[in-house]
Image (spheres, rainbow, N blue to C red):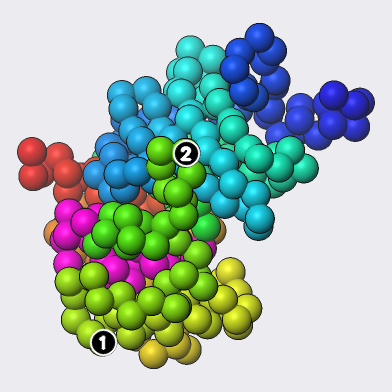
Amino acid sequence: MTDENATTAAAEGVHRHAGEAGEALTLSYRPPYAWPALRDFLAGRAIDGLEWVDEAHYGRTFRWGQARGHFTAEHRPEHHAFRVWLALDAPSAQAPVVRRIRRLLDLDADTATVEAHLARAVPTLALTEGLRLPGTWSPFEAGVRAILGQQISVTAARRLVETLVTNLGEPLGGRRCFPTPEAIAASDLAFLGMPGSRRATLRRFAAWYAAGEAGDEPLAWTTLKGIGPWTARYAALRGTGHPDIWLAGDAAVRRALPHLGDTDPAAAAPWRSYLPLQLWCHDTLSRT
């Protein structure tokens, strides 16, 4: 590693390890980190063949431009870090891929600052320490997941995404990558058991994205027919790690709203994205 690369790695909380198969990195974070909550969220939405989750690990395939690869991240709480094994067919893409993994796992969040603000803004809400935004690989993938998840359960949405990946995802070893915008736009999506209007929205979105017209700012996607505020906000939260998204209309958020008392969610700005996470935790506890 050059001095310049070593400086960059240190600044990003990256330390390299030798002597193991592939590239092994340690990606650090500031504690606390509520890994069980993030793990359970990701596990409930994990796509077979694309992602893998167990007690201490999350992994997936990915694309970065023309590069393809996969990673597995192991939580090492005693080190306040994740050990990440990264396989990538284009070494020049490593730096942006590592940044994307950090964003997906929300490793750069200062949860102590976020939660101190939420405690003042919403004093009636008992907070879970260390909650992190549950990222996905790209704004495009987040948009597809959000469109497929419109007005159906998490389980039903996961099945639709799995069907999409199985039919259109490019093979990578024994797994598949998430389908490209071009692949989705070119398909009639007849294999998806959902209303024709939603298939049309998905194809329209994919074609828009493939043409370079959509951009990576999901909050601007509501100009496209079939994409409403909830879809755009969900894609912004999961696809870009936007810290200030309030998911009004989310079913689990609505169920947990009594925990806010009379507080206006706007009081949680500029950290409103972390408020739904807290409410999702309360909803999960009330339903178990």
User: Foreground residue, 185 or 174?
Assistant: 174
Residue 138 position (above or below residue 281)? below
Residue found farthest to the top:
19
Q: Quadrant of the N terminus?
A: top right
Q: Closer to the N terminus: mark 2 or mark 1?
A: 2
Whether the residues at callouts 2 and 1 have beta carbons within 8 Å, the answer is no
Hey, what amino acid is under mark 2? Gly
**Which span is picked out in magenta?**
139-159
Q: Within 10 Å of the Cα at label 2, are there few (<14), some (14-19), or many (20+) other Cα atoms?
A: few
Where does the image place residue 138, in percent across and percent down from the top left? 52, 57
Say which quarter of the image contains residue 204.
bottom left
- Find out whether residue 102 is within the magenta segment: no
Residue 240 position (above or below residue 195)? above
Work out whether residue 219 can be spotted.
Answer: no
Element type where label 2 sits in the image: loop
Hey, what amino acid is under mark 1? Ser
Say which quarter of the image contains residue 186.
bottom left
Report the side of 98 relative to 228 (left or right). Answer: right
Residue 173 tag number: 2
Q: Which residue is mark 1?
A: 197
Residue at image point 27% right, 81% down: 198
